[in-house]
Image: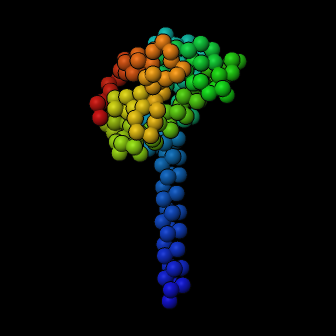
């Protein structure tokens, strides 16, 4: 009898795990294919001409944002906020992302987009809040504060008093990021 109960429980747990995995996969596929409530295309507009970005920067940011499922306006705002030289366009300081060659912009954009995705997951897990406003599909001010300066479970993209920021420029990061992103559309507080 005990073995039978164990087998039934094991089957139920396995079926639940498979269903959850299928749902996660379906949600990811829907986001990637732009069918998840239509928010990806409706919330994200072209960044052409935004902030004086070059055609190459615009094309790269839009392509990488689409590949990673992040808001191209936010990625462009991060590019403008960081304003780094070749190999540091998005301020990513990982050695593999700082190679100065013809792919440096794309590599930096990919690392930044990956960081945005990871930070969304951390933020939602740590705070119980959604990073995206459900009505506009844009990142909330609360998420942007967490992204820039950190919070529970995350040090921040540009934390204050960082060892790699001896002149204190990170103090301007949040204000600049909110300002640039705010120029592309409304930002909700939540």
Task: Point out residue 85 in the picture as x, y percentages from the top left corner.
Answer: 59, 12
Q: Left or right? Give the position of 141 relative to 15.
A: left
Quadrant housing residue 153: top left
Q: Residue furthest top?
A: 52
Q: Residue furthest right?
A: 101
Task: Point out residue 12 in the picture as x, y percentages from the top left corner.
Answer: 48, 72
Q: Residue furthest left?
A: 189
Asked which colour scheme the image uses, the reply is rainbow
Reply above or below: 20 against 178. Answer: below
Q: Residue at x 52, y 22 (%)?
A: 163
Reply above or below: 123 against 91. Answer: below
Q: Nearer the viewer, residue 14 or 31?
A: 14
Residue 159 seen in the figure: yes
Q: Nearer the viewer, residue 81 or 25?
A: 81
Q: Residue at x 49, y 33 (%)?
A: 116
Q: Residue at x 41, y 18 (%)?
A: 171
Residue 37 seen in the figure: no
The mark tally for this picture is 0
Task: Point out residue 7 in the picture as x, y percentages from the top left corner.
Answer: 54, 79
Q: Left or right? Give the position of 96 relative to 41.
A: right
Q: Residue at x 41, y 16 (%)?
A: 172
Q: Nearer the viewer, residue 99 or 66?
A: 99
Reply above or below: 23 against 182. Answer: below
Task: Point out residue 130 in the picture as x, y percentages from the top left corner.
Answer: 36, 41
The quarter of the picture where the C terminus appears is: top left
Q: Residue furthest bottom?
A: 1
């Amino acid at each position: 009898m005990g073995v039978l109960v164990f087998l039934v429980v094991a089957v139920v747990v396995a079926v639940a795990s498979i269903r959850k995995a299928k749902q996660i996969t379906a949600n990811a596929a829907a986001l990637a294919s732009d069918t998840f409530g239509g928010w990806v295309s409706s919330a994200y507009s072209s960044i052409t001409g935004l902030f004086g970005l070059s055609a190459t920067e615009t094309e790269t940011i839009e392509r990488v944002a689409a590949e990673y499922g992040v808001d191209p306006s936010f990625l462009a705002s991060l590019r403008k906020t960081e304003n780094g030289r070749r190999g540091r366009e998005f301020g990513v300081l990982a050695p593999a992302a700082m190679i100065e060659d013809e792919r440096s912009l794309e590599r930096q954009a990919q690392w930044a987009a990956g960081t945005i995705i990871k930070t969304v997951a951390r933020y939602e897990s740590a705070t119980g809040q959604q990073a995206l406003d459900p009505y506009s599909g844009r990142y909330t001010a609360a998420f942007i504060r967490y992204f820039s300066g950190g919070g529970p479970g995350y040090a921040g993209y540009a934390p204050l008093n960082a060892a790699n920021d001896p002149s204190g420029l990170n103090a301007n990061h949040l204000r600049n990021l909110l300002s640039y992103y705010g120029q592309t559309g409304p930002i909700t507080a939540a």
